[in-house]
Image: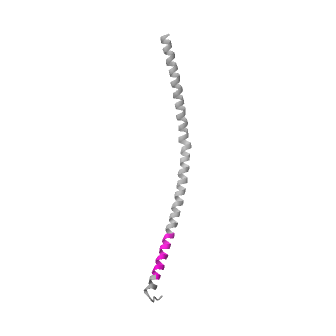
């Protein structure tokens, strides 16, 4: 390969460097796509796990907390009635 001028040499260098940059960008894009696919899989696993935890822990805990608050309300209501009855018996 003979270069008749420095411009020919410049064009060859530019072509080679453009090829190298293109290969580098293609490899980078390929790895980025693989990473994003892994992130998608991880996100799906986290979503699935959080749904399971919600079904196993959070919903029963809310149910039990609701039942306890109702029981405390009923207990307070009955306790106040008993207290009134005791006061009436003591006064009457």
Q: Is residue 84 above or below residue 44?
A: above
Tell me what residue is drawn at x 43 percent, y 86 percent. 6
Asked if the magenta segment contains residue 27, the reply would be no
Q: Pick out the residue farthest to the top.
A: 92
Query: How many marks do you count on the picture?
Result: 0
Tell me what residue is drawn at x 52 percent, y 20 percent. 81
Residue 45 horizontal/vertical position (percent): 54, 52
Tell me what residue is drawn at x 56 percent, y 47 percent. 51
Q: Image quadrant of residue 10? A: bottom left
Residue 38 horizontal/vertical position (percent): 52, 59
Q: Is residue 37 above or below residue 85?
A: below
Residue 91 horizontal/vertical position (percent): 48, 11
Tell me what residue is drawn at x 52 percent, y 25 percent. 75
Q: Could you tell me what secondary structure mostly forms the magenta stretch?
A: helix
Front-most of residues 85 and 11: 11
Residue 63 horizontal/vertical position (percent): 55, 36
Q: Which residues are magenta?
A: 11-26
Q: Is residue 32 above or below residue 90?
A: below
């Amino acid at each position: 390969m003979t270069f008749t001028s420095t411009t020919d040499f410049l064009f060859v260098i530019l072509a080679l460097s453009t090829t190298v940059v293109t290969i580098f960008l293609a490899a980078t894009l390929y790895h980025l796509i693989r990473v994003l696919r892994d992130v998608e899989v991880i996100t799906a696993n986290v979503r699935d796990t959080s749904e399971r935890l919600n079904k196993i822990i959070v919903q029963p805990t809310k149910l039990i907390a609701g039942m306890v608050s109702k029981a405390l309300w009923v207990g307070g209501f009955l306790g106040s009635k008993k207290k009134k009855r005791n006061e009436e018996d003591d006064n009457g």
